[in-house]
Amino acid sequence: MSNDLTERTVDEATPPSANHFVAPLEETPLLAIDVVKVADKPSNLWIDAWRDARRRPIFWISGFFIVLVCVVALFPGLFTNVAPNNDCQLINSNGGPTAGHILGFTKQGCDVYSRIINGTSTSLAVGIIVIVLTTVLGIVFGAFAGFYGGAVDGFLSRIGDIFFSIPYILAAVVIMSVLVNYRSVWTISLAIGIFAWPATARVLRAEILRVKNSDFVMASEALGVSSLRILMRHVLPNSIAPVIAITTISLAGAIVAEATLSFLGVGLGSSIMSWGNDINQAQKDLRTNPQTLIYPSLALSLTVFAFILMGEVIRDALDPKARALR
Amino acid sequence: MGGYILRRLLQAIPVFFGTTFLIYFMVFAMPGDPIIAMFGDKTPNPALVAQLRAQYHLDQPFIVQYFIYIGGIFRGDFGISYSGVPVGDILLRTFPVTLKLAVIALFFETVFGILVGLISGLRKGKLFDASSLVISLILISLPIFVIAFVGQYVFGVQLGWARTTVGPGAPVGDLILPALVLASISFAQIVRLTRSSVIETSSLDFVRTAYSKGLSRNRIVPVHILRNSLIPVVTYLATDFGVLLVGATVTEGIFNVPGVGNTLYQAIIRSEGPTVVSFVTVMVLLYLVVNLIVDLLYGLLDPRIRYVK
């Protein structure tokens, strides 16, 4: 934003000493001379954020893990060739690790490792569908409420308050208990997403309230640009950063929500492989066979941890104020 | 202040009707006939079905049913559980236990959370700060049931320091482990909030003034920095109540604490739809009331809030 100003201050061709007396360099530290490279590519928030993020080791570590999780979710066959459901033998029930089955067996005699690998796509799919849903709903409600203000804001914000007042896991518990016969990745994502969007809307609304008083918005108004066009072309692109900053963390939240619902037994049907379902199944054998509980929990926690770390890096990178806190 | 209270109360009315309507709508607009479902596989007697329909006002239009239900809530009638016991009675029996658990958890998370956050904020970038940051991130990443199982396995099964399930009457000693589990996630959030708030406050002019007046650090930290850093933490505690309610459902279920959360947990496991809905409604109403009270207190604590639309 401020780049336009700094670029024009001094031209490289005329050094300050040409017109005025300037103290010799030994007496003035170089800081005082502000020659700006006019030819340089202008930077913006996103380039700055990328520069900031790529310098942090956490970005690369969590990024690597997230890419790994995505690959596992897309191509489980690359990591295991043991069928997660079909090769189950009750003779192996709660058995320890053997050759080819490094993490042992579940109560039903299924391979724990294979079930974890094949359950990855469920968690990831729920996470992605939920953030698409919450981001779209959040942008629609937040943008119109913040930009138009007044009665529109009052109406949309009260709707948001209503959805915000029901903790989204509790709401999803109700929806999923009603939808006993329709439990799938889609319904659980809808159940979570429909009540999770007000957080996004609130963030965007606050940012739009800040941005819409900027000079460039006033300039567009003066030029006679229609209000919808100002919102879409000028205000929204300049207020979207905080929304992007929270999406990765919301994705982690959605994965936890799915696992919690499946753990409670109102999540996905038992035919769908999910870490939450496996943890639910394993909890009864905590004393005798803790590893069937520990490995899916570990997979779940590590994935969530990677997304939360990445979310932190993205938020820090997009928010100069957060950078100061580091 | 009077205007602020009035405005806040008026805002709460549409939210109250909206949330209850939404829950009611979710349940009754969904596929399936609750009366037919009561008979299971058997073919119901039409006369009995009609009688039950009238008894539960299911023959009335949807909106009338909703207002009959709201009227019940105002009279303290939250419906009847699956086993025929009024939900209100179950609440009276289980609520004190949950309250005890929540108070212990709140104590742990606020006292230790603010303490750790304050030290981290004052020693930004030092070892203590870095390690508390990592630990809080790990705690945020662990789903509450994972923390509960780890706690139960390590302290209950392996070390034998605590009982894995809570005994009858829920004595305070038994509740400490579940309360610690319940407190863990919010603890991490409070550490982070306090830390960033302390860092921000420390760089403000009035703190510099206090230092230049020659006040001792022992006075500046608690009086000038800490007190002014707590506003976001107080706000967080209101939203945190929702986390606490969900957390209580899982923790009470795992540790078998005879509280409100456990009743909901058992109802979910046994797929007792109507009981689930009644308890979720009660929890949401509780959440609304707590948020309203915190908002009012917040207006009292911070005069700036009252004037902001």
Image (cartoon, coloured by chain):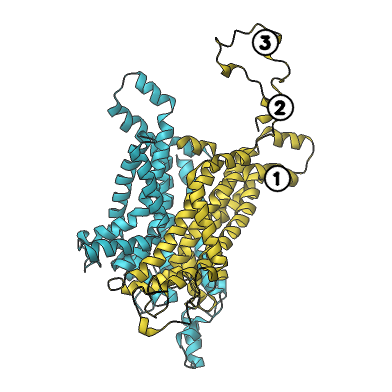
Chain colours: A yellow, B cyan
Asked whether, in this view, residue B184 is left or right of residue A38, the answer is left
At 75% across and 37% down in the image, what residue appears? A221
Q: Are marks 1 and 3 on the same chain?
A: yes
Measuring from the top left, give residue A74's x and y in whole percent. 57, 66
> Mark 2 = which residue?
A38
> Mark 1 = which residue?
A231
Label 2, label 1: how far apart the Cα atoms are: 31 Å
Asked whether, in this view, residue B160 is left or right of residue B26, the answer is left
Label 1, label 3: how far apart the Cα atoms are: 46 Å
Which chain letter goes with mark 2? A
Amino acid bearing label 1: Leu
At 27% across and 58% down in the image, what residue appears? B100
Asked whether, in this view, residue B187 is left or right of residue B32, the answer is left
Of the numbered discs 1 and 3, the one sitting upstream in the chain is 3
> Mark 3 = which residue?
A17
The count of marks equals 3
Measuring from the top left, give residue A222's x and y in whole percent. 77, 34
Which chain letter goes with mark 1? A
Q: Are marks 2 and 1 on the same chain?
A: yes
Circle 1 or circle 3, nearest the eye: 3
Measuring from the top left, give residue B52's x and y in whole percent. 47, 84
Label 2, label 3: how far apart the Cα atoms are: 19 Å
Secondary structure beneath label 2: loop
Q: Are marks 2 and 3 in contact (CB under 8 Å)?
A: no
Measuring from the top left, give residue A239's x and y in whole percent. 62, 43
Of the numbered discs 2 and 1, the one sitting upstream in the chain is 2
Residue B99: quadrant of the picture:
bottom left
Q: Are marks 2 and 3 on the same chain?
A: yes
Secondary structure beneath label 3: helix
Amino acid bearing label 2: Val
Q: Are marks 1 and 3 in contact (CB under 8 Å)?
A: no
